[in-house]
Amino acid sequence: MTTDHDGIEAVARAAVLAGGAELPDRYRDGDDDGDYGAHDVKAAADEAAEARMLPLVRRAFPAHEVFAEEAGEFDGTEPYRWIIDPLDGTNNFAAGLPTFGSSVAVRREGEPLLAAVHLPATDETYLARRNAGVRYDGERVTADSDVPIEGATVATIVGRDVPRSPDLGRRADEIREALDDTVKRVLDSWAPTVHSSLFARGRLEGLVQFHPDEEEQAVTELLAAEAGGATRRDGPLYVAACDEETLAALWAAVDGAR
């Protein structure tokens, strides 16, 4: 069966808008109900947003494989995998910080095909599609930036397993320190899809991923590639930059820290 990629894009966009619509009132009301751990938090808002998103995807594409952050895995018979993150930036949300969003990624035969991100606090939507670029509120955008490396802002993204491992945590700290010696500002991202979206329209000069989680990795890498970013990977380490010169400087810094 041939799947209409325009249809996938429409459903992905509808899903992130539906998930995002659940969040503003909860955020303004200070809804911090959830389970708090040493390294993460699961808020009631995650489940509520996913309850709006997941049925849209399952009804539209019942034969597609789905991973939903709260509900888990759903098997499929077609070569598509949906990855639903109803509330990226849960820690920010629970702390009253407006840096959070709802995101969806779709892989086809393992390769990122489409990503959609909606930021409820600012009512902004990003769509990235393989070989079709990135659109920000309907307009094509790129990762181009004229900011020199000494004035650059770079976001670091680490997976949830990194702080649980002393060795990985130490290496992540070394990477951050090396970046801090190279650029003006390093952001420890607690909302990777939000910062990846900002990179895709030239508001950040770089992204560094280290052992990322699946729900962020597909979104980040598709946004970076389709926005024309310069990228490089070595196993669990991935760097995206606004241009080749910036990439070379960032890679030299993080590679030396490993």
Image (cartoon, rainbow, N blue to C red):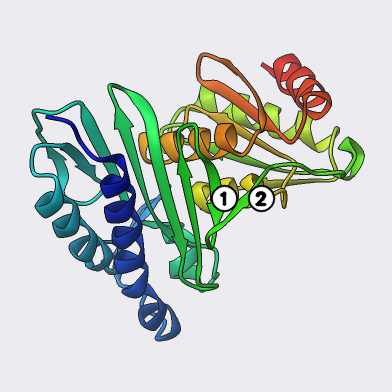
Q: Residues within 10 Å of mark 2 (few under 14, many from 20)?
A: many
2 and 1 marks in contact (CB < 8 Å):
yes
Q: Which residue is mark 2?
A: 201
Q: Nearer the viewer, residue 184 or 5?
A: 5
Give residue 147's quadrant in the image: top right
Q: Nearer the viewer, residue 96 or 217?
A: 217
Picture residue at 74% right of the left edge, 36% below the top:
242
Image-based side of 239 in relation to 44, left or right:
right
Image-based side of 147 in relation to 8, left or right:
right
Query: Label 1 amino acid?
Result: Ser
**Residue 81 at what x, y percent from top left?**
24, 34
**Residue 31 at what x, y percent from top left?**
36, 78
Picture residue at 41% right of the left edge, 60% below the top:
90
Q: Identify the secondary structure beneath mark 2.
A: loop
Real-space Cα separation, disc 2 to disc 1, in angstroms: 7 Å
Whether residue 119 is situated above or below residue 184 in the rendered picture: below
Give residue 112's quadrant in the image: top left
Image-based side of 249 in relation to 140, left or right:
right
Give residue 226's quadrant in the image: top right
* Numbered label attached to residue 197: 1
Whether residue 133 is situated above or below residue 167 in the rendered picture: below
**Residue 42 at what x, y percent from top left?**
31, 58
* Numbered label attached to residue 52: none
Picture residue at 61% right of the left edge, 30% below the top:
172
Q: Nearer the viewer, residue 243 or 96?
A: 243
Quadrant of the rendering where the N terminus is positioned? top left
Q: Identify the secondary structure beneath mark 1.
A: helix
Q: Is residue 35 visible?
A: no
Q: Is residue 249 visible?
A: yes
Query: Label 2 amino acid?
Result: Arg
Image-based side of 175 in relation to 9, left or right:
right
